[in-house]
Image (cartoon, helix red, strand yellow):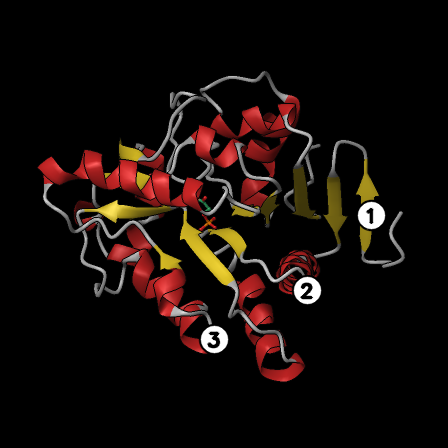
Amino acid sequence: MSNNPNRTSCARNLTLCANAEQASLYVAEQIAELIQEQQKLGKPAVLGLATGNTPKIVYQELIRMHQHEGLSFHNVVSFNLDEYYPIYPEDDQSYTYFMRKYLFGHIDIQPHNIHIPHADCPADAIAQYCKDYEDKIKAFGGLDLQLLGIGRNGHIGFNEPGSSFESTTRLVDLHPLTRKDAQNDFGTIDKVPHHAISIGIQTITQSKKILLLALGANKSTIISQALKGKISTEVPASILQTLPQVEYVLDRDAAALI
Ligand code: PGA
């Protein structure tokens, strides 16, 4: 049990929180601690970052810590999980836009330390682009901490059902459920891209620490499958069951079926 009455630590690296806010504040604390520990050592903190609804309160809290508690991001190197393809970084639906709006535009991260798959390169340059993205992560010694959400189909990043557990950064086809869930952001389903660039499952599983955050009742079914079901490429997040460095942080609604 933790000292915080809103939080319970359970077996299998499970942290259950009373609500989305508590879960998000807990994740933000973990990130801030890592950044500060690395600062004391004079080292970069290499963060794998996620987009979507799930990390929004986490980012809001990190901004608050920066503005009111002096948390600096000067040593942070970030790699985002994924980006639609094709899309321009300045498009409202791009993850470059998202990260600027919800985090980077409000903190002191150095612009040259931000990495997001800018998927506006021509089709014949994508394979090399993906290899370079992967090499850059390796050049920093890998990811110190990967923040993950989970898709309703079990995807992590845009590693959709069927993705190999050995996959690295690459161009992927988006699953129909992923496109449907993105419909609100794009207005109509036909405007949602069919492809994306995503870091791979292997890239994710090599992170030194992985925090999977799931919030809300619409994640309860997939969370139950991912944590308790068979390990299968049909539920990409199920591979995380095998990793000691994974911590699942769930609010009560997301944890309802486990
Ligand atoms: P969400 O997406 O945070 O918007 O629910 C999560 C994901 O698809 O990984």
Mark 2 or mark 1, which is nearer the start of the sequence?
1
**At 13% across and 39% down in the image, what residue appears?**
125
Disc number lying in front (1 or 3)? 3
Q: Nearer the viewer, residue 152 or 132?
A: 132
Residue 230: x and y, percent? Answer: 59, 16
Vertical placement of 49 versus 157: above or below?
A: below
User: What secondary structure is marked by label 1?
Assistant: strand
Mark 2 closeness class: few <14, some 14–19, many ≥20 residues within 10 Å: few
Quarter the C terminus occupies: top right
**Quadrant hosting residue 9:** top right
Q: What residue is shown with label 2?
A: 40
Q: Amino acid at mark 2?
A: Lys
Q: What residue is shown with label 1?
A: 8
Q: Amino acid at mark 1?
A: Thr
User: What secondary structure is marked by label 2?
Assistant: helix
Residue 228: x and y, percent? Answer: 66, 24
Label number found at residue 39: none
Residue 27: x and y, percent? Answer: 65, 56
**At 90% across and 57% down in the image, what residue appears?**
3
Mark 3 closeness class: few <14, some 14–19, many ≥20 residues within 10 Å: some
User: What secondary structure is marked by label 3?
Assistant: loop
Q: What residue is shown with label 3?
A: 108
Q: Amino acid at mark 3?
A: Asp
Q: Residue lying farthest bottom?
A: 68
Vertical placement of 28 versus 164: above or below?
A: below
Mark 2 or mark 3, which is nearer the start of the sequence?
2
Mark 3 or mark 1, which is nearer the start of the sequence?
1
Can see residue 51? Answer: no
Q: Is residue 178 left or right of residue 109?
A: left
**At 75% across and 55% down in the image, what residue appears?**
18
Disc number lying in front (1 or 2)? 2
